[in-house]
Image: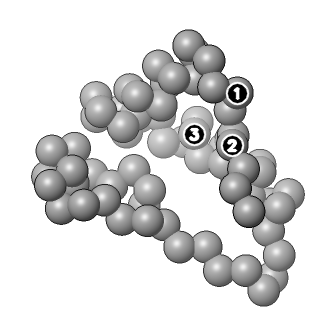
Amino acid sequence: MIRASFVYNSFSRDLILHFKHVDGLHLTPILGRFLKRHFVALSRQDQLVIPVPLQRRRYLARRYNQSA
C-alpha cells in the first residue's frame, strides 16, 4: 500500500525538496509527525516497514539518508 502525506502543490514541493537537497534536517520532526499520523492509521501488527536506502553516490552528495 502506498500513501502520500501531502497534496502535491507548490508548498509541499518546496518543503520536500528543501528537506531532500538543502540539508533540511531541521524539518525532520515536522515531516515525521505527518508521516506518523498516516502510518498509525494504516499499520497492522503483521506488517514490516523497511526504508529504502539511497545509492552511495546520492548519500555522499546529500550527506544523510532521508528515508532513515
Residue at (24%, 61%) from the top-left corner? 55
Q: Badge 1: few (under 14), some or many (20 or more) residues near its Cα, within 10 Å?
A: few
Q: Can you tell which quarter of the image residue 52 is in?
A: bottom left
Q: Tell me if residue 28 comes above or below residue 22 in the rendering.
A: below
In front here: 14 or 32? Answer: 14
Residue at (62%, 18%) from the top-left corner? 9
Q: Which dot marks residue 31?
A: 3
Residue occupied by mark 1: 7
In front here: 64 or 50? Answer: 50
How much space separates mark 3 and mark 1, taking CA atoms? Answer: 13 Å
Instruction: Give the amino acid type for the residue marked by disc 3 in the picture.
Output: Leu
Q: Which dot marks residue 4?
A: 2
Q: Tell me if residue 12 comes above or below residue 20 in the rendering.
A: above
Give coordinates of residue 45: x percent, y percent.
Answer: 80, 82
Q: Tell me if residue 18 comes above or below residue 50 in the rendering.
A: above
Secondary structure of the residue carrying tag 3 is: helix
Give coordinates of residue 32: x percent, y percent.
Answer: 59, 46
Q: Which dot marks residue 40?
A: none
The numbered mark, 2 or 3, whose residue comes first in the sequence reads 2
Q: Can you tell which quarter of the image residue 47 is in?
A: bottom right
Q: Are marks 2 and 1 in contact (CB under 8 Å)?
A: yes
Residue 29 in sight:
yes
Q: Is residue 49 left or right of residue 28?
A: right
Residue at (21%, 54%) from the top-left corner? 59
Instruction: Give the amino acid type for the residue marked by disc 1 in the picture.
Output: Val
Q: Badge 2: few (under 14), some or many (20 or more) residues near its Cα, within 10 Å?
A: few
Instruction: Give the amino acid type for the residue marked by disc 2 in the picture.
Output: Ala
Residue at the extreme bottom of the image, as rendered: 46
Q: Is residue 40 left or right of residue 18?
A: right
Question: Looking at the figure, which quarter contains the N terminus?
Answer: bottom right
